[in-house]
Image (cartoon, coloured by chain):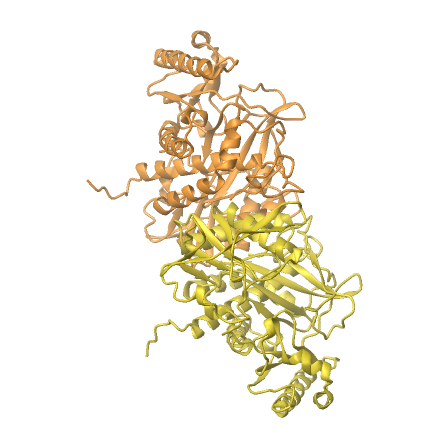
Chain colours: A orange, B yellow
Amino acid sequence: MVPHLITALTGPINELENRILESMPAIERWFRLEWMEHTPPFYCSVDIRNAGFKLAPVDTNLFPGGFNNLTPEMLPLAVQAAMAAIEKICPEAKNLLLIPENHTRNTFYLTNVQTLMRIFNQAGLNVRLGSLDDSVKAPLKLPLPDGTELTIEPLARTRGRLGLKDFDPCTILLNNDLSAGIPKALENLHEQYLLPPLHAGWAVRRKTNHFERYEEVAKKFAKLLGMDPWLINPMFAQCGQVNWQDASGLDCVRANADALLTKIRRKYKEYGINEKPFVVVKADNGTYGMGIMTVRDAKELDEVSRRTKNKMGTVKDGQQVTEVIIQEGVPTYERINAAVAEPVVYMIDRYVVGGFYRVHAERGIDENLNAPGASFVPLAFSASHHLPKPGEKPGVSAPNRFYMYGVIGRLAMLAASYELESTDPDAEIYE
Amino acid sequence: MVPHLITALTGPINELENRILESMPAIERWFRLEWMEHTPPFYCSVDIRNAGFKLAPVDTNLFPGGFNNLTPEMLPLAVQAAMAAIEKICPEAKNLLLIPENHTRNTFYLTNVQTLMRIFNQAGLNVRLGSLDDSVKAPLKLPLPDGTELTIEPLARTRGRLGLKDFDPCTILLNNDLSAGIPKALENLHEQYLLPPLHAGWAVRRKTNHFERYEEVAKKFAKLLGMDPWLINPMFAQCGQVNWQDASGLDCVRANADALLTKIRRKYKEYGINEKPFVVVKADNGTYGMGIMTVRDAKELDEVSRRTKNKMGTVKDGQQVTEVIIQEGVPTYERINAAVAEPVVYMIDRYVVGGFYRVHAERGIDENLNAPGASFVPLAFSASHHLPKPGEKPGVSAPNRFYMYGVIGRLAMLAASYELESTDPDAEIYE
């Protein structure tokens, strides 16, 4: 189930959207059956692009950092979902240790941490913050915009357990994507629940792995609805050894971009779509919108500037980019006050708990919006017609366009679940 | 977790309320552990009285009929809770058969049925309506205020299963309290889930049984918070053989009312409460606010008028009242536009999904409000501060008074769970 939030796009519901809306009970049942076989990631946010002819996820974040962008009305949904998640994992739990990103005084991010603490507190847990930063030797107070403050404490590691001074948690929740690698303090915690697991961090995770699983999910789902999976699936290719500085390995990127552009052109022709195809080249293990470029013609890769090379070659925490994903670009037709916008769907456990728009006034519909200058617009609950009513005459109820986004978000979450199963180093292998 | 709804009562948070607010994480954990041992009823509504010095449930309905009184903003919470409930019971389910009350064209009730259908439809089920009324021989259309209509169909019973023509449900959800007795069509359905179970209907259920279990729950909870259970528990007594027409058995009611009034007077003295005690005499198996009288002095029972005798002697569907509960009266200090009001809390599975006020302009604070002339005021979500923030200075966040109501509502729901376990005719007995 997906709350009815007001989307900026208000045009008529197109064929693809209509098919999803009409199939709601079948879709919900399908998800129910999938979640019987697969464990959802603890939480998850998905960036979505709605091109009208195509609706697809472009990024799936397993350490969502924008809970502050949800409206207060959505928080009860988040708490209810958090309760469901905790009941499954550690029902006796009293304490939750939350580990946020290091070195940040970004008040937006800190408000995200504050919101997460409130959600889990309401769900019935004592929540405290621990820092992976070795320089934090004593409790550190970080001021918040509302006049209160967060206290982040040094971690206390014993042989089998991780906690804080006088605080022994049942579950450790990471809100740190481990871009800098897996810290020693988190290794071999066999007595506690560490969520998401270490292999969900960017030190291990690869986007190509995720989108390979997403393709599998999209095919299953498209079969259920009797449609072409391409309508919800962004095609992609990968290159393993790219050195942006000496341009070695760029041949692979160029060839793959060219092949992908040809494939997109063919699809556009098949569907009579009058758009200029583009691909997006991204770090396979990157995050925070660093190391991303839009390519409309493979030749553009011959003339990459020094600045772009530097930008492409490094992501968060100074990690070097050598592995690259080349992804089909999906234009976004959502706009807020004329600025290009893309919806972001937030989920906890198997539930959609809210969403917001990422908006960037200086970017085009074929560009990455997760960049400096972006702002966030919370999606409000629809004031009048909160639940879509299938089978009703148009005009009787406003269609819930956000329902579609919630479906695509959950497909990406399901793909993340497949992905984490396949990359789990402790998984038992049945031959 | 409980959504933050705006209560009419805005006075300062008193000692009892403060204790509940401060203990939130411990309370939520306590409920989590209780729900590991006990299955919540599928859905439930609880009438609550807030006297300031005391906060208690006065009635627990296992066939709630006021989903139409929830604001649209609450429906996503209801859908999320319904999904959680279905996942546990029948995850593969495609179809749900909903059985509403018979013979009703009351549009408020029909809108309740429509809302329930929407909730379960959104949760991923095909929902159709079946009638227990034998006179329904063909699909019957019932018009709704929004211009749409409901279709209610005759039941189709086979040896092991109940359904409709071309409709075989996994789960049958009763929204009919079975006051008229257990219909043959519902007996021996061992292949399907019938929820709530037959022994939750008023043909079997007794209020005294419920409040006996509630006392047990209240004692456990009061121990957790280190307080007197009386502060949340309405005392009661029962009489088994009362004939209102020839006044036989009224001696028992009189003696019990007198003894209970004395007990309440003693408690009021202990706490320095300056109120006139009263008790409420109700049918032990009644519903719909029929057969209820307020007694301030046991002598009042000597002068019961013919009209009152008739009223007391019969409840819904002409059922005769011989068993009676004498319950401690709890005044309600909630008012809406000067009219006396009592909060009603709605729950699905273990979750509070919303609430509303029952308001009656012509009744006193010590009278039953569930009577002709009552109206319903949906509780809105609090606009600014949605989650209570324990430990914060007053004024920083508005306290969530509805949280308390959600706690008391869930205590009553837990008591209903204990009650249904103890009255289950199919329960296995371990000696």
Viewer-side residue, A318 vs B331:
B331
Viewer-side residue, A115 vs B363:
B363
Q: Is residue A50 left or right of residue A427?
A: right
Q: Quadrant of residue B104?
A: bottom right
Residue most extreme to the right: B338
Place of residue B424 in the rendered image (x, y in percent of width and height, measured from the top left)? 42, 72
Viewer-side residue, B243 vs A95:
B243
Image mark count: 0
Place of residue A41 in the rendered image (x, y in percent of width and height, measured from the top left)? 41, 42
* Residue B85 seen from this side: yes
Q: Is residue A126 left or right of residue A107?
A: left
Place of residue B140 in the rendered image (x, y in percent of width and height, measured from the top left)? 56, 52
Viewer-side residue, A30 vs B380:
A30
Q: Quadrant of residue B63?
A: bottom right
Q: Is residue A321 left or right of residue B23?
A: left
* Residue A170 seen from this side: no
Place of residue B351 in the rendered image (x, y in percent of width and height, measured from the top left)? 53, 57
Q: Would you place residue A297 above or below residue B419 in this image? A: above
* Residue at (36% x, 21% y) in the render: A238
Q: Looking at the figure, which quarter contains the C terminus of chain B?
A: bottom left
Q: Looking at the figure, which quarter contains the N terminus of chain B?
A: bottom right
Q: Would you place residue B35 above or below residue B310 in this image? A: above
